[in-house]
Image: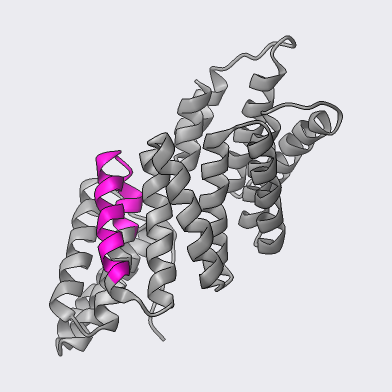
Amino acid sequence: SIFEAMSAAWRNQSAIALKSLGTIKPTIQDPEVHLKQLALLGTTHASLQRFPEAEAELSQAQAFCNLHQSSACTWVLRSRAYLAYEQNHLDEAYELHKQSITASIRYKARLGLALSLTSLGYISLQQERYDQSVDWSRSAIQEASRLNAKDILQAAKGNLSWALFRLGDSDTALTMLEEARESAASVGDTNDAIIWLIASGYIHASREEIVASRTDYDRAMAIARETDSKENQPNILTDLGLVALAAGNPSEADACAQQSLTIARATGDRPNMAD
């Protein structure tokens, strides 16, 4: 269904999203379904870096939206924003999400509103506009809570926690990261659960709380191995190596670095190595 595809696209599960979208057969009498399908195809292809396909799908959808009013056009705006983000056009992505918010309010599309508020919180983090990220993320938390949209809620909480950390409030950040991790785990979003543990490990390390940092990274690695999430393992191992160095264990740090490189070579990824 459309919402199964939407959930998969939200979690960057591209293969599942494409499979779900392939089963949908919209008709001329149901242009909203076709617009949503095009929007999700655009998002999925953008996540796979297949930009020409994404641009073609979203151009087709936007051409319809230029001539007709439809609540599904909020989906198109969000997908265009995601494509811009993947192409590193952050200012364009930011503006498109703001347009999506305006349209979502007009059409009373509360789920779309929560999604774009969350995305604006995240983009503001990338732009190092931490005060803005706090404002957008708090609004996203409020909206997601009203909808009981738990996966969106955990993402917004995670974004807010990182903004608060960057603004100097690491205590609140750590509390919210644990809440975000628990929520992510409860809805089966293991990738975000790993991300929030990595973030928590980083904050503990910045406070020289080596045991707590090591615990968070170990927990993140356990989930990554359990779910065969090879894209996260190299960077977790790199961070574990840095923690080992801080604890005075250079041999353990070297072992982590070697494991990280081995996995990265096998998957074709490059870990984020320390300078």
Q: Main secondary structure of the magenta part?
A: helix
Q: Relative to 172, does residue 51 appear above or below in the rendering?
A: above
Q: Residue at x 18, y 60 (%)?
A: 219
Q: Is residue 144 left or right of residue 123?
A: left
Q: Is residue 261 left or right of residue 78?
A: left
Q: Nearer the viewer, residue 191 or 119?
A: 119
- Residue 270 % position (x, y): 43, 67
Q: Relative to 219, does residue 140 appear above or below in the rendering?
A: above
- Residue 150 % position (x, y): 36, 40
* Colour scheme shown: one colour
Query: Is residue 154 found inside the magenta-colored segment of the image?
Result: no
Q: Is residue 233 left or right of residue 104?
A: left
Query: Is residue 189 found inside the magenta-colored segment of the image?
Result: yes
Q: Relative to 206, does residue 199 appear above or below in the rendering?
A: above
Quadrant of res 188: top left
Quadrant of res 144: top left
Q: Residue at x 17, y 80 (%)?
A: 210
The magenta stretch is 172-195
Q: Residue at x 69, y 39 (%)?
A: 103
- Residue 274 % position (x, y): 38, 82
- Residue 60 % position (x, y): 78, 32
Q: Nearer the viewer, residue 231 or 123?
A: 123
Residue 43 visible, this orientation: yes
